[in-house]
Amino acid sequence: MQKRRLSQDDRATDKLVVLGLVSLLMVSVLSITAYFVLDSDAEEMPIDEWEWVDPVIENTEYFNHSHGDLLAHRLSTPNMQLIDYHNLNCDGNVKPPQELDNTAGRPCSPEFKNVAPTPGDSSEIAIEGNFMEDCVKHPDGTGGCYAYVSSYNQFEILDISDPNNIVLLSTYYAEVARMIDIKVTADNNWVLVNHELTNSELDPIPNADDANSGANRLDLIYVGGLYKNEPVKVAEWDNPPAGFHNQDVHVYCDWEPANPVWAQDECHLFLFGADPYPEMAEGDSGTFYKGTQIFYVPLGLEGLIPGVSNSDEDANTSREILRWGGYSPEVETTCGGSLFNHDNVFHEHPITGQKLLYISYWDAGLRIVDVSNPPDVADPLGLSWPQDNEVGRWLGCPSADDGWYGPDGGGHADM
């Protein structure tokens, strides 16, 4: 009796093992089938067979298309899906009231989204926000995710916290020159835009009007909290003759200047400008300022916020900006020729904590300069800061066959 029971138990165990194997086999078959089905779907349209048609220049059907017509802009690949679009129309007006020109922005209305008119071309986009917190907005006005778009005579601020429903909050317009680049501090409080010299022959102004050529400067604009709906310019730096080709901005909260009045502030604002002209020729002033220029904005961040001043009359006046340092590649470390300071990017190293400025040059390659510790006293000519703080270099001169400046030394210098 006992032997029969054991035999039955063995058969039951065998059945369970068989059923388990069959189940695993079925799961494997289904997985392989699903893989090939999905793979075959992906292979239905190979990349080399994608049809690329730019409706603006190639499709005669839409030759006179409207930028407010979403269907007229269909240049895309099958693996991308457009989830929302905004033609940057703020309030139906191309320009603001005269009193706002070059001083402050204006709030935008949602009913003008994707209707005519559409403003000028976009040259750069910067995004900042608490993306890792799902763009949650806090009662004190912090939080949220935003896109800042520079579009020739103006820049726009868009709320992209809900990417399926982007909202244009405001537009800042300046009839002085093109806005090439736009940078934003990580706290979403400060915007830095550059106006670069416009050559109407090589880079025509859209309206064929030379009236706004030749304005060359940096504009610092406050966009914190509710000011994202009405941004206000609080400082500017004029930089003739060519202006800045690129720029960046950063808030230092671990620097103590020698001036006891400035030292009372917890954080300090520094601006970084890439001016190509000094690298090519010395200016008429007789004073040689280097192409990478670093500026400090004193009076404290509180003093720069609109409305926080000694009087209402000072609420929207330009504040003082000081040239604090400069950098140019040593001539013997370049490929010769006319050096052109093209771009610079500020970045805080995630491991070392160093504050680094990455600068790209024509004929001088990529330079990495440590700007972690600004001097207590300004060094406007860049005699030592950050001139002595170059920590990295990547370039190769076409004229050299080997060595540091040859192809093995980093490649081509025109970055």
Image: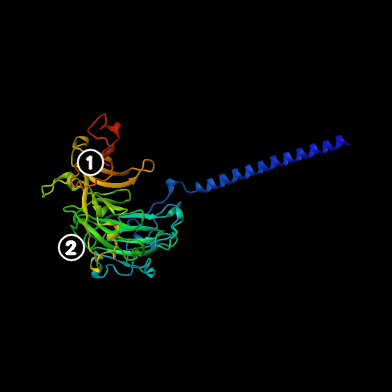
Give the x, y percent position of residue 365: 26, 39
Residue 205 image-quadrant placement: bottom left
Q: Give the farthest residue toward the front.
A: 260
Structural distance between the alpha carbons of marks 2 and 1: 38 Å
Q: In the image, is 141 to the left or to the right of 239?
A: right
238 or 4, nearer to the observer:
238
Label whose residue precedes the other's in the sequence (2 or 1): 2
Indicate which label's residue lies in the foreground, 2 or 1. Answer: 1
* Residue count near mark 1 (Cα–Cα under 10 Å), binned few <14, some 14–19, many ≥20: many
Residue at the outermost right position? 1
Disc 1, SS:
helix
Q: Residue 44: x, y in percent?
A: 50, 48
Query: Picture quarter containing residue 87?
Result: bottom left
Name the colouring of the figure.
Answer: rainbow
Instruction: Give the residue pinned by disc 2.
Output: 211
Q: Which mark is residue 387?
A: 1
Residue type at mark 1 is Gln
- Does any portion of residue 345 appear in the rendered image? yes
The quadrant in which residue 102 appears is bottom left
| Image: 250 above or below 2 | below
Q: Where does the C terminus fall, quadrant-wise?
A: top left
Which residue is more in the foreground, 195 or 34?
A: 195
